[in-house]
Image (spheres, rainbow, N blue to C red):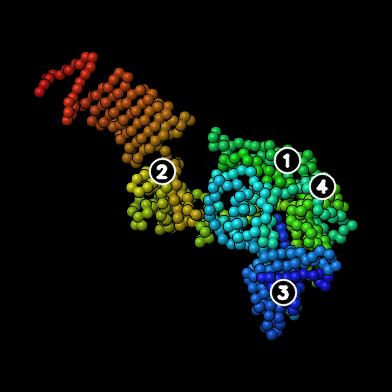
Amino acid sequence: MSSITYTITSDNKAMPAGYNLLSISVSNEVNRISYAEMVLIDGDYSKLEYSISDGDFFDPGKKISISIREEGQSEKEKVIFKGLVITQSLRYDQGNSLLTVEMSDEAIRMTTIKQSDVFKNIKDSELIAKLIFNSRIGKGKVDETKFKHESIVQYHCTNWDMLLSRADVNGLLVTAVNGSISARAPKLSTPSVKTFKLGVDVIYDLDLKLDISNQYAGIQTNTWNDTNHSVVGKSDIPSFDLTQGTLKAAGIKKISGDKPEQLLALVPLSAEEENAWGEARMLRTRLSMLKGSFKVDGITSLNLMDNINLEGMGLKFAGVTMITGIRHEVTENGWFTHLQFGLGADWLSGTTPLTALPASGLLPGINGLQTAIVEAIELDASERARVKVRMFGVAGADKVVWARMATLDAGHKRGTFFWPEKDDEVVLGFINDDPRYPVILGSLYGSKNTAPVEWDDTNARKGFLSKTGLMLLFNDDAQQITISASDKSYIIISEGRKAIEINDVNGNNITLNSDGVVINAAENLVIEAKGDVSIKGKTVKIEGNKIEFK
């Protein structure tokens, strides 16, 4: 390492000259937080003395800066890493006691705490900037996004995961280097900052790969339109060709077919968000077609997302490409820089677990909906309005659970109340996927518990029937509502017949129709008023075996 000049500081204090440094590794990659590792010989294992580890230079949380340059070069040392000490480890290897120090960019703060928040009237670029600010990290360049959310929710996830997910679907690549976070759109058409030519430049460990397994002729987005209740497909997402290599979109069609990749979101999206989503997917899939890495002698003039020109590497790989990863490696063999280009095809949300553990990790969670049988209708001693149910797959006479009951409306001393009956088959959901907190979402008909009204193609009849036969029935074909306590006691309100009919079990009947009102009493008919009674008509007839006036 005699040809390399480097400076390492901890909280702005230079590393003591007596520290025996074996290696430095610094890794920068788009959509990842930069990290570094140093290995030093520390102390004397035989004497159980570890002066570096016992000291405070590399204490966790210390701010470390690493600068480097090659001797004989005119430029000054360049900072290749700034960050915090995260871990230390000691090991004994070939007679030496080795201290490994691992460090991370300060953006690591964004990954430590899961948070929930609601952001109003905000663009994704503004949201990204706000998340960076809230995490007390330096903000670099954040490219402006087009559409504005009326409301967007961050639910129990880290600021870093929220930032990455929103940047990803907007076609922005995130860099977290030297205490500054940027989110920028790739500029693949800009000139390259450096050319690497195989056979002319010194290049080691060349590894190139072409993969069309995620290439499509186009992208079609499919979203829910809540105005006309339909899924609407949008297939005019613009395609583009990489400037690198000779394989173009026309060739991809011949190999992978002429069908677009289907993106499906069964929620309403604005046209701007839908376009950004489709364009981001097109960008990611195209950047996944050509991937590779190679190693050169140490260089500090290149940055993430710089464009470089590759020559002498075959027609399919030659051309301008974008740097997506840089790793500096300093060992006794010298200083080397590893360069990487290309991206994986999967969304970041598909490769990183962003959602919380089922049941918050308190116990194994339960997935999906479950069916159960109502075991008994009895008083819930906890006064939480729960129902005792038996879940399928849980054996044992006493293996029952208490489930809360979801209903149409519930509030203090008001709401709807339709409790299930013993042996009813019900559907259970689980709060936070926790099997200890089931909720009855509804009941199921089947071959055993049959529906009270047979279904037909018109689906005209809807209503409610209690276990004793009390019924409320809506019939759209007849335009009729029936309220019934039995086949003799009922009220029929018929818009189709323009009539209302009231009958009771005693044989009394009232009919209202276009002919007027008819009241039939099985026995006596009494009309009584506290005030006056007026009877008026074109003709008034009174008939009876005996008529009395008082």
Q: Which residue is mark 3?
A: 15
The image position of residue 101, as x and y in percent, is 68, 71
Residue 241 visible (yes or no) = yes
Q: What whole-number distance in Å separates the C-alpha atoms at marks 3 and 1?
A: 52 Å
Numbered disc in front, either 3 or 1: 3
Q: Which residue is mark 4?
A: 245
Residue 111 visible (yes or no) = no
**Marks 3 and 1, the one that precedes in the sequence:** 3
**Marks 2 and 4, the one that precedes in the sequence:** 4
User: Which residue is more in the foreground, 437 or 73?
Assistant: 73
Q: What whole-number distance in Å separates the C-alpha atoms at marks 2 and 3?
A: 68 Å
Q: Residue at x 75, y 42 (%)?
A: 240
Seen from this angle, which residue lies furthest left?
550
Q: Secondary structure at mark 4?
A: loop
Q: What label sits on residue 491 in the rendered view?
A: none
Seen from this angle, which residue lies furthest right?
200
Instruction: Give above or below for 6 relative to 520.
Output: below
Q: What whole-number distance in Å separates the C-alpha atoms at marks 2 and 1?
A: 48 Å
Seen from this angle, which residue lies furthest top?
539
Q: Residue at x 75, y 57 (%)?
A: 303
Q: Which residue is mark 2?
A: 408
Q: What whole-number distance in Å separates the C-alpha atoms at marks 4 and 3?
A: 46 Å
Q: Residue at x 24, y 28 (%)?
A: 507
Residue 304 in the figure: left or right of residue 275: right
Instruction: Tell me whether the residue at label 4 lies in contact with that at label 3, contact meaning CB atoms closer than 8 angstroms.
Output: no
Q: Which residue is mark 1?
A: 239
Instruction: Tell me whether the residue at label 4 lies in contact with that at label 1, contact meaning CB atoms closer than 8 angstroms.
Output: no
